[in-house]
Amino acid sequence: MAPQDDVNSNPPCHLRACAIQNCLTKNNYNESKCQGLIDALYECCDVFYQKNGDDASTVSCPKASLLRLKMKQRQDEHAK
């Protein structure tokens, strides 16, 4: 599912957040096994904030400023 599609779900990005929870449960809460799903949620949340502004909110996404910090940290980790 494209981030634009998931942004239009109710609540936005919820399916991606649920996918992370399912992955964590299946993998004994080993976050490293769910990295792709976490990246997909962040991508969806980024599209959500681009579309609705930084003051928008959804239960599935961190606040816009925290999201950007997390995305930068993950990008920096991948660059190493």
Image (cartoon, rainbow, N blue to C red):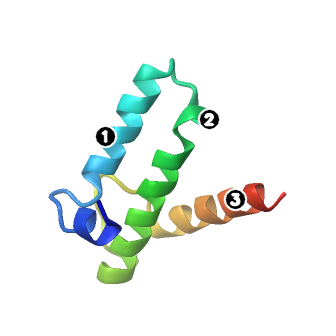
Element on which disc 1 rests: helix
Residue 1: quadrant of the picture:
bottom left
Q: CA distance from mark 2 to mark 1?
A: 16 Å
Q: Which mark is residue 18?
A: 1
Amino acid at the residue labelled 3: Gln
| On screen, residue 27 above or below 53 | above
Please give the residue where the numbered disc 3 appears in the rendered image: 73
User: Whole-percent x and y of residue 59?
Assistant: 29, 52
Q: Is residue 14 left or right of residue 46?
A: left
Q: Which residue is mark 2?
A: 32
Measured from the top left, where is residue 23 in percent x and y? 42, 31
The residue that appears at 57% across and 33% down in the rendered structure is 33
Rendered residue at 79%/62% (across/down): 79
Residue at figure coordinates x 41%, y 39% from the top left: 20
Within 10 Å of disc 1 (Cα), the crowding (few <14, some 14-19, many 20+) is some
Q: Helix or strand or loop: what does disc 2 sit on?
A: helix
Name which of mark 2 and mark 3 comes first in the sequence. Answer: 2
